[in-house]
Amino acid sequence: MNTLEAVGDLRLTGLTKRFGSFTAVDDLDLTIPQGSFFALLGASGCGKTTTLRMVSGLEDPTAGRIYIGDTEVTSTKPYKRPVNTVFQNYALFPHLNIYDNVAFGLRRRGVKDVKKQVDDILALVELAHLAKRKPTQLSGGQQQRVAVARALINQPQVLLLDEPLGALDLKLRRQMQIELKRIQTEVGLTFVHVTHDQEEAMTMADTIAVMSAGRIEQLGSPEELYENPATTFVANFLGQSNLVAGTVTGKEDGVITVDTHGVRIALPESRSRVESGAVIVGVRPEKVELAAGNAAIESGRNALPGGVVTDASFIGVSTQYLVKMPWGQELSVFEQNTGKEIYRPGAEVTLHWDATQTFGLDGSQDIEAGAEIDDEAAK
Amino acid sequence: MTKTFDWIKAHTLGFVAILIFVFLIAPNAVMLLFSFNQPANKYNFVWHKFSLNAWKNPCASADMCSSIKLSITIAIITMILATALGTMVAFAMMRYRFQGRTFLNVLLFLPMAAPEVTMGITLMTFFYNTTGSNSLGFDTIIIAHVMFSLSYVVVTVKARLAGMDPTLENAAADLYATPFQTFRRVTLPLVMPGILAAALLSFALSIDDYIITVLTAGNEVTFPMYVYSSFQHSVPAQIDVIGSTMLLITLAGITFAQVPQIIKTRKA
Ligand SMILES: Nc1ncnc2c1ncn2[C@@H]1O[C@H](COP(=O)(O)OP(=O)(O)OP(=O)(O)O)[C@@H](O)[C@H]1O
Ligand SMILES: [Mg+2]
């Protein structure tokens, strides 16, 4: 069977890659439905590029299999796979002009009349006027768009994008995001999009896989991952979280009660990963509100009293607070600008939020996992 | 005071550049000048009077012109063989891990590092003991020239290959190019400047080699050998004519090679 015509879901089973004794990709099991937009999100060095290289055939897996539909392509040569890549470093051919770079794939497959297709795709990425230039005469962002066009023009079953928008400024980035998403929906290709940028992953992808140290930490829709992170890594890496360690003290009517630093917190059972013992309770900063001093909090809401504001930054639509808790931990709160009082540093406050917005994680994990990496990526 | 100092500072680089340029160009200028000389005696060392004789009659000595023909033939064959072999060696060394790769690396530097006389004697001894003393001649010169040019070719092509981004070949494979198409469409065009430089280098090394050639030439006489031996009884102005012609051809070649570049930059 001609592997170039394989159609269907992209399936990875037990995919592993070791470089010497170092495991870059660790026993990956993944099904990416045909026609879906899949984002692979993770910190630098976690194995994203290596995974893509195995799918495109440029790297031989140490173990595991790769399927496109029912066709196994694990050891198929890269030029016989219906897969194209937008490389992280663009990898444009320096001796060919933009037009010939973009036409390269079509010509290798023996397509005779490439002009119309090349012109169309160059117009799409707004580079028609630069067709005769060499890659070195283009800006970083323009080169990136050529790389996207060069892969996209082949309309492969699976398009692998290795941080394809990294070098673009915010405006162009948004524009390309919309464009890529539109093309993907229109042509129904499977996109596997690697990115550092969680916002990009969330706005574009149907499914996100958060990867860490060669493994998938969690896989799901953007909402699922954001609302119900499975690990502290995901909770910290995807957006920000307030995570507080505690112990389960009881369970009643689908609500788990947790003791954290002497305070009783209610946690919906459906949103908790553990039902007894050590637990980490979490809540997203934008769901938390502040009340002055030890004001009484209505029932149905969780409250953490005794906080002292250490930093308040007013940024127009919201105010971002850092609040130091009696046990020394600093929690963050994003309060929307609804005309409420702004608390100054030094003010005593109680944090409170809708109890159903609380999530619970396995208490044996590192509470800071993924947090530092995210800060770095944000810079 | 500071003004003069500033002026000196600003112009030192230009001044040094001019000095170096003069230093490089002077011998060639003298050669060109003396090709128009009509020497008073057999030695074209002292300016006597302007004449076009040597240029009108470059082959006054038949031996000289046959020696030039021989030198050019040898240089062309050497260039083709050394470039083809050296390019293959360079690819093998860059692309494959094999036993003795490091050793081969050292071996390749040997002809560059070893004194030429030693190499010449060694080669002569080698030919005496293998193909016999009668075998010295055209073939042995070629073998010797290919041998010492090879290292330079390998080093030049290897440097070019090492500077090539390996993901370019990945990208070609990803875009449906078979290994052969990848080589033809991507690798070869990118390495070509290195291969051309290596070819020029091996031609230049071969055409002016004296020491090794003399020791492996048997009865053959190449141009450098002719010049050196003629020195015993005469130095005709024709030698300067040949030298000048080579210089002009080289200059024309370099200029010509840059024309497409210049046109392109103009257009862009
Ligand atoms: N050829 C190789 N030999 C040895 N180690 C390698 C090789 N390629 C990658 N690695 C290692 O494997 C790990 C994963 O690399 P990979 O390139 O997949 O990371 P990544 O997730 O794409 O990172 P980034 O976001 O920085 O691009 C890294 O620790 C890297 O050092
Ligand atoms: Mg990468």
Image (spheres, coloured by chain):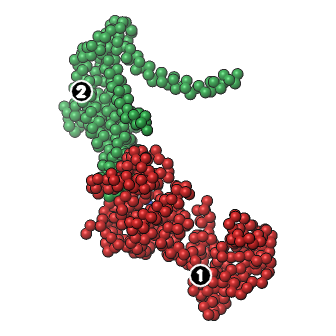
Chain colours: A red, B green
In the drawing, what numbered circle is on residue B70?
Answer: 2
Give the residue type at disc 2: Leu
The residue sitting at 32% across, 60% down in the picture is A79
Q: Nearer the viewer, residue B169 or A87?
A: A87
The residue sitting at 32% across, 21% down in the picture is B245
Q: Nearer the viewer, residue B229 or B128?
A: B229
Dot 2: chain letter: B
Q: Nearer the viewer, residue A56 or B88?
A: A56
Q: Quadrant of residue A76?
A: bottom left
Residue B169 can be seen, yes or no: no
Q: Is residue B148 left or right of residue A227?
A: left
In the drawing, what numbered circle is on residue A362?
Answer: 1
Q: CA distance from mark 1 to mark 2?
A: 85 Å
Residue reaching furthest to the front: A339
Give the residue type at disc 1: Asp
Marks 1 and 2 belong to one chain: no
Residue A167 can be seen, yes or no: yes
x and y, in percent, of residue A9 in the image: 37, 73
Residue reaching furthest to the bottom: A252
